[in-house]
Amino acid sequence: MFAQGLLAEAVRLVAERMVDGRATGAHQCELTVLQRPDRATVSSGFAALVPGGACYSEWSGLFPGAPARIRAKLEREGFTGVRLYWMLPTADSARAWFEARSAKPGYRKIVRGIIAQYAAHSGATGLLPLALDTAFALDLFPSICATCYKPLSDGDSRGDAPVEFPNWLTAGIAQRAGVSANDLVLVMRAGGEFVQNKVSWLVFVSDSPELRWVAKVPRNPAVAGALQREHDALRLLADDSARSSAIALPKVLMWDERDGLPVLVQTALDGESLNSLARRNEFPDLARRLGAALAEFAGSPPAALVVEWWPELVEPWLERLSDALGLFGEKELAPAVREALSGVDALPLVWCHNDCTPWNAVMEGNSLGLFDWEDGVEEGLPLVDLVYLLANTAFVADGTVGAPDAVRSYRRLLDPTDPRGSAFLGSLATYARAVGVRVEDVPRLRIATWLAHTTQDLEIILEAAGEPSPQLLASSVCLPLLRAELEVFGAGSDSRA
């Protein structure tokens, strides 16, 4: 380890044993990590590796021609298989990795499109094309990382050096899709802040800006099951012609394993992200289109009695919510949710995405496309996907996603005198009629929506913090939404009485 700070902490979390690069003596390491190295550090890093060992290095500094210079330094020391990546936005907070190479015009469009997603909320988007063209023309990349290897010794009994993951992935996709591996372009992207988020590889063909496939890899073995569930859901949906024609769905291109972890490659969906559409389209129009698409996807399944779905779809969530709130001394909310939901009897069970959000959806005209099916179930509660999708669409439009102010946006949706509320409630009513949900069960299913998401929200907060506190409870975004629904439900019950 020739690094400090966050990089050193990250490597310490995955290493069985770590040696300080400043320590004297001969080392036989499988990995060398270098941070802003000089020539002597590169030489020491090479010497510390076993034959076939890997080197990861990070370089910073705005100077023209940096990729070529970095490659030359590493190869001069004896490293092979050098790959260089431009990290966006910085090394410490990287979310995307682009190969730092001489870029063709099509590749520039790819990079522009991905960076534009990160710059959508800033005022720098107008200067983005000029800045990127300048960076590509001068090979001027502020943060670069490199991967490379120490060659195997002559006569090494371990056989050939392992095939790098990008090369392995490219070969697998090319074979199954019937394209040339040389025509494929890969961009790596991190999915988020949590360990359950996946690493994705965006796959393009011949430097065309249209995304063709997405490859997903879990960050650790503990969450590999989520990828298995997504694969299984997509296979089931592909076999259900009525469902697969109602909305656009990814198709599985490749399902394989690498180093004990599953790798899922699926087709990308055409259309514009609902995340961006929500910011510049009228909510009533989107509510109508989204409601119609999800109602068609649900179909008209037969009703199932409460004894069939309650033990699996409701009771576990109630118990988990009670446990989580109990740590905060909150004992009244879970029983109130139970009482509200106990009025539901028979329900049509439908395919549920269970993470139906604008950032997991695209639209092309009135056609809705949904991806990230790791939480999908074949027999789930009706209406909950639509409630969650419309609510988050409103939050995106208001800029309140993940913020305490989200409850204000949601209260507008519950107000039938507000144009946005009228559209929200009208879309739910139209869906209910089409699918076969009783009108009196619509408010209860809205509560069921926030039962699940509030429980997950609280569990994530508790896992991150360790110790419960009133401040932690106040940081939950979903809990106020569940409370708002219970207030409206209680008021509705009084008026009906």
Image: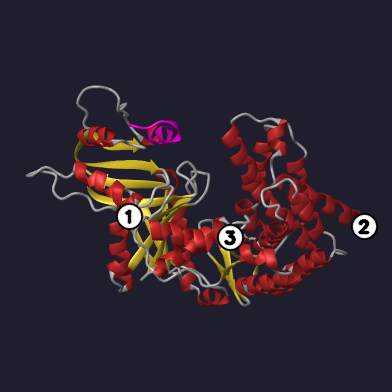
Q: Is residue 42 visible?
A: yes
The disc placed on residue 257 is: 1
Q: Which sits in the foreground, 182 or 349?
A: 182
Q: Which residue is mark 2?
A: 495
Label whose residue precedes the other's in the sequence (1 or 2):
1
Q: Between tags 3 and 2, which lies in front? A: 3
Pointer 1 local density, CA inside 10 Å: few below 14, some 14–19, many at least 20: few
Pointer 3 local density, CA inside 10 Å: few below 14, some 14–19, many at least 20: some
Label whose residue precedes the other's in the sequence (3 or 2):
3
Q: Which residue is mark 3?
A: 125
Q: Is residue 251 above or below residue 455?
A: below
- Range drawn in magenta: 1-11
What secondary structure is marked by label 1?
strand
Q: Which sits in the foreground, 442 or 211?
A: 211
Q: Between tags 1 and 3, which lies in front? A: 3
Residue shown at the point (8%, 44%) measured from the top left: 154
Q: Quadrant of the C terminus?
A: bottom right
Q: Which sits in the foreground, 12 or 38?
A: 38
What secondary structure is marked by label 2?
helix
What secondary structure is marked by label 3?
helix
Residue 183: say if magenta: no
